[in-house]
Image (cartoon, grey):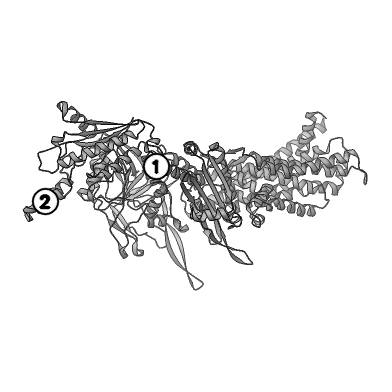
């Protein structure tokens, strides 16, 4: 038969089956039931709006089970009905090969399944209107449904060919399809070890389906589903061929058919198990390639000079919710090994089966098994198991436990979802840490890629105080020692600023703001003693803390590390110390410290000495309170040295201690300093109709029982920022949403030409401001939140970057360090002038000056809220889930990474941002969106029915016209 005739006969059969479907209520019942069940599960079964995530994966989660029954229902009558009515004998007598009829019926059923899926398309469109939907997993999810449905249809057709009873065909088809699904599910695999369980997952339809719906299209999964279809379609044809054969007589033709079917069946088992051992050939369709090794990770792997060991400690028997995550982690670790090209060795072991490795894990790495309670309907038991990853490089290692790798989402006591948080980010962060620790143990200059020049702008010895002359000699000896060990990458340049008509003094005053120093306010003697380290494009000032050699060595090493690759950066963190009720600090930032400390050295900074530690790479001021002149001077001079100051401050601070909600006026001590740099925080709070909800407990009387529940109320003080996030800056571009709690508007001095401002966070255009400190939620008689906008509405700035050549706030003011020293000296002299000379010799020399302006690298990053990332507020903005709200913390981590120009981990972290939140909706609006999807599905079904009827009528008219002719 010619190819054209082959395709013609196949499509003729397919058209006939489709016509028969729509000639009876079968097609409409199938499509209607499919759409109704899918929408019900999505909105009610999986609580779409309660999840608050813009994705449609819940729709696909139930598809494997739903398709078992629907596909079996479609196919149960196709061959059984032919046999019952006797038309099967007509099929056998035709010259058309039987496989044409088989393919035709299969394509007819497949077309009906595709039409049913078409009805659900309004669902992802709707979700995309409510949030930022990633279309990659959506398209791959629909592909997974079509592939799985095709496999179930092929199975159902083969079963139907063996029975003349539709009910028997339905039951057997459901049983066989269900067996293929459950063989790879946790219901079966939990009884086996990880290795054996992985074999079952390779044979099951459900496990492969889940991989594709995540957005990862693997060639092996495609081959699996296609091979299932081919095998059962071949069996279908074989069953029909058998009816043509003479009973109890075997010919060569019969043996060939049996051998072909046996080989195809073996292929499904052997070939798929063999392909499972090969490297992955897959396409990651997710936005940002969330399931592929990123370029940032490859950059860190390229820095490896020695083999890196990544060892996964996973127990075969573990908690059922952790078991499915083990193969996902193992697959990711294998990707590290492949990409690293021999520089990474990956081992996956069960410590309980390897006693020597378990002893090493316990003693060297401090890994202990974690007891998990496992319960079913018959018994409860405790299983001690391992779920750890160790990253080891040289003598350095990092341990990741299950708390570091997973996230738990609990919508109800019995509805708990456990997922991998962002494993690539966590593992790459560990690799970065061990790499940095290993490099820091060697020669600093091994990681410096450019020549460095130490420049000392130091006056001649006759102008220096005696202590500085001695210190200069010690300093020179240390520098010469560094130069000898620097492999030619370090040079020394000593310059006397007053020489040659003080041209150098004028130049450094203009470039760096270096002014003459003195030892007291009333001293007529001045001198220079500034130390800098410069590279190709950066100049770092080395602070002069005291005259100790150890201090200079520490500060010099810190400066060198700023030019080196792979060293952990230092964050100087300033938080409130004033206590509120019950002796607790008014604001705590432990979550922020923990999140920053995962990849940075976080040091609590004390500004009372008037300076910031020389090791600090960035200064963070979180809800600063009552900074005095000396503390403000430390902040100011850190900025003047080219540093970055991150400040979260406003005129108001909330007190949540003691179970109350009280807003207080707050004096940071930064207001005048910020205003000097063109940043003014207004004495009011922003209120926005686009806001996050405020959880409030409500007691209800139900049948005489007092029940307490959490009700989510509109709360305009929790500004919900989405469109107001700057999409062009890495700090905010990857955040799906941000809640700014009790934030104040920021005003900019646009007349400042020396400072560039970048707007990071803005409220909506309908926001207004309020200066009232009564922030308790306001409820009307119906128990609903009631807020009305007052005054003009407009956008308000809540976060900003200021960068440029800042001028010092203390240019025309007394140096606070010298002023306090002079007062102290005068007091002591009046009290006991005889001991003045002895005490002067005993006390260290205080040397200070005011750097008058900053270099171009100086930055201020300002967020106008004291409380949006403090611990209690993070829980409050987490809503009824009682989980900490993480987007605010992510903002601060992104800010630090951006300021330190460490965007590599930022790019990986953004790939793990799976939680795409929805636009906030009222309950009636949620119901409107839900019912709207039902209506759209119904309209599409009606449109399809009208199209089919019109097409049938046109065919009838053509047939009548042909008869008339």
Residue 710 in sight = yes
Q: Earlier in the sequence, mark 1 or mark 2?
A: 1
Q: Please indicate whether residue 211 sits to the left or right of residue 660 in the image.
A: right
Q: Position of residue 249 (x, y in %)?
A: 93, 44
Mark seen at residue 440: 1
Q: Position of residue 915 (x, y in %)?
A: 49, 48
Splitting the image into 4 quarters, where does residue 486 fall?
top left
Residue 111 in sight = no
Front: mark 1 or 2? 2
Q: Please tell me how crowded label 1 is: few (under 14), some (14-19), or many (20+) other residues with Cα within 10 Å.
A: some
- The front one of 890 and 750 is 890
Q: Quadrant of the N terminus?
A: top right
Give the residue at the far top of this rendering. Answer: 500
Q: CA distance from mark 1 to mark 2?
A: 43 Å
Mark seen at residue 939: none
Whether residue 767 is situated above or below residue 582 in the rendered picture: above
Q: Position of residue 14 (x, y in %)?
A: 76, 39
Q: Position of residue 401 (x, y in %)?
A: 50, 53
Give the residue at the far bottom of this rendering. Answer: 704
- The front one of 759 and 597 is 597
- The front one of 234 and 939 is 234
Q: Residue at x 7, y 56 (%)?
A: 831
Q: Secondary structure at mark 1?
A: helix
Q: Quadrant of the C terminus?
A: top right
Mark seen at residue 838: 2
Whether residue 666 is situated above or below residue 338 in the rendered picture: below
Q: Secondary structure at mark 2?
A: helix
Tags 1 and 2 in contact by the CB under 8 Å rule?
no
Splitting the image into 4 quarters, where does residue 318 fall?
bottom right
Q: Please tell me how crowded label 2 is: few (under 14), some (14-19), or many (20+) other residues with Cα within 10 Å.
A: few
- The front one of 613 and 425 is 613
């Amino acid at each position: 038969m010619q190819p054209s005739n082959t395709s013609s006969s196949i499509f003729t059969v397919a058209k006939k089956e489709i016509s028969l479907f729509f000639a009876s209520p079968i097609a409409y019942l199938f499509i209607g039931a499919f759409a109704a069940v899918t929408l019900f599960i999505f909105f009610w079964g999986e609580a779409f709006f309660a999840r608050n995530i813009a994705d449609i994966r819940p729709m696909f989660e139930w598809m494997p089970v739903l398709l078992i029954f629907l596909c079996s229902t479609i196919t149960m009558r196709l061959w059984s009905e032919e046999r019952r009515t006797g038309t099967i004998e007509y099929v056998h007598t035709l010259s058309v090969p039987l496989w044409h009829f088989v393919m035709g019926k299969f394509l007819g059923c497949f077309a009906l399944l595709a039409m049913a899926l078409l009805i659900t398309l309004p669902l992802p469109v709707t979700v995309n209107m409510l949030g930022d939907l990633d279309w990659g997993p959506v398209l791959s999810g629909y592909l997974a449904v079509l592939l799985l449905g095709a496999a179930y249809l092929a199975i159902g057709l083969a079963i139907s060919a063996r029975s003349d009873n539709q009910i028997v065909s339905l039951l057997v088809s459901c049983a066989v399809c269900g067996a293929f699904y459950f063989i790879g599910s946790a219901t079966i695999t939990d009884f086996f070890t990880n290795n054996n369980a992985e074999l079952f997952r390779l044979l099951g339809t459900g496990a492969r389906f889940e991989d594709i719906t995540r957005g990862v299209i693997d060639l092996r999964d495609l081959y699996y589903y296609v091979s299932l279809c081919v095998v059962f379609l071949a069996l279908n044809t074989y069953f029909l061929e058998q009816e043509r054969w003479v009973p109890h007589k075997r010919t060569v033709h019969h043996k060939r058919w049996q051998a072909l079917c046996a080989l195809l069946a073996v292929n499904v088992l052997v070939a798929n198990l063999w392909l499972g051992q090969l490297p992955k050939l897959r396409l990651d369709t997710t936005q940002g390639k969330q399931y592929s090794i990123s370029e940032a990770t490859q950059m860190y792997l390229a820095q490896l000079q020695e083999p890196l060991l990544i060892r996964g400690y996973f127990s075969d028997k573990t908690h059922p919710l952790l078991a499915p995550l083990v193969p996902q982690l193992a697959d990711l670790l294998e990707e590290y090994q492949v990409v690293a090209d021999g520089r990474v060795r990956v081992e996956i072991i069960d410590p309980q089966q390897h006693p020597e490795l378990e002893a090493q894990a316990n003693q060297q790495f401090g890994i202990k098994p974690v007891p998990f309670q496992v319960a079913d309907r018959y018994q409860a038991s405790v299983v001690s198991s391992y779920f750890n990853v160790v990253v080891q490089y040289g003598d350095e290692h990092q341990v990741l436990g299950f708390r570091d790798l997973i996230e738990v989402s609990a919508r109800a006591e019995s509805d708990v979802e456990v997922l991998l948080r962002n494993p690539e980010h966590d593992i790459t962060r560990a690799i970065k840490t061990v790499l940095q620790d290993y490099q820091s143990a060697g020669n600093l200059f091994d990681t410096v890629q450019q020549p460095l020049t130490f420049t000392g702008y130091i006056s001649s010895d006759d102008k220096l105080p005696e202590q500085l002359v001695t210190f200069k000699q010690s300093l020179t000896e240390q520098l010469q020692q560094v130069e000898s060990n620097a492999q030619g990458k370090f040079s020394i340049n000593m310059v006397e600023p007053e020489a040659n008509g003080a041209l150098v003094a004028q130049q450094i005053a203009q470039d760096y703001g270096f002014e003459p120093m003195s030892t007291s306010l009333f001293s007529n003697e001045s001198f220079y003693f500034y130390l800098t380290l410069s590279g190709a494009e950066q100049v770092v000032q080395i602070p002069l803390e005291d005259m100790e050699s150890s201090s200079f060595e520490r500060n010099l090493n810190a400066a060198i590390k700023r030019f080196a690759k792979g060293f952990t950066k230092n964050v100087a963190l300033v938080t409130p110390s004033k206590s509120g009720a019950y002796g607790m600090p008014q604001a705590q930032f432990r979550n922020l410290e923990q999140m920053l400390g995962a990849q940075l050295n976080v040091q609590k900074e004390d500004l009372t000495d008037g300076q910031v530690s020389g090791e600090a790479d960035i200064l963070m001021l979180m809800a600063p309170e009552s900074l005095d002149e000396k503390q403000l001077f430390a902040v100011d001079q850190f900025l003047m040295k080219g540093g970055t100051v991150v400040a979260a401050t406003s005129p108001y601070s909330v007190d949540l201690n003691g179970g109350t909600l009280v807003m207080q006026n707050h004096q940071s001590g930064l207001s005048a300093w910020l205003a000097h740099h063109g940043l003014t925080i207004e004495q009011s709070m922003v209120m926005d109709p686009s806001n996050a909800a405020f959880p409030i407990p409500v007691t209800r009387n139900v049948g005489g029982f007092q029940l307490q529940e959490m009700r989510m109320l509109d709360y305009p003080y929790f500004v919900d920022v989405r469109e107001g996030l700057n999409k062009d800056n890495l700090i905010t571009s990857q955040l799906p949403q941000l809640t700014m709690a009790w934030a104040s508007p920021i005003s900019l001095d646009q007349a400042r030409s020396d400072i560039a401002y970048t707007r990071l966070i803005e409220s909506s255009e309908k926001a207004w401001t309020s200066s009232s400190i009564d922030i308790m939620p306001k409820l009307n008689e119906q128990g609903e939140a009631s807020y009305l906008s007052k005054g003009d509405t407009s956008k308000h700035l809540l976060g900003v970057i200021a960068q440029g050549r800042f001028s010092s706030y203390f240019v025309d003011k007394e140096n606070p360090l010298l002023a306090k020293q002079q007062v102290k000296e005068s007091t002591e002299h009046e009290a006991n002038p005889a001991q003045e000379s002895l005490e002067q010799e005993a006390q260290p020399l205080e040397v200070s000056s005011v750097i008058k302006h900053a270099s171009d690298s100086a930055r201020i990053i300002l967020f106008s809220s004291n409380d949006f990332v403090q611990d209690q507020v993070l829980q409050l903005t987490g809503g009824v889930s009682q989980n900490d709200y993480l987007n605010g913390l992510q903002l601060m981590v992104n800010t630090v990474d951006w300021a330190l120009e460490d965007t590599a981990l930022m790019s990986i972290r953004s790939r793990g941002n799976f939680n795409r939140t929805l636009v906030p909706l009222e309950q009636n609006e949620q119901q409107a969106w839900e019912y709207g999807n039902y209506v759209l599905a119904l309209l599409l079904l009606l449109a399809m029915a009208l199209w089919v009827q019109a097409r049938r009528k046109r065919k009838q008219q053509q047939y009548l016209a042909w008869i008339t002719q």
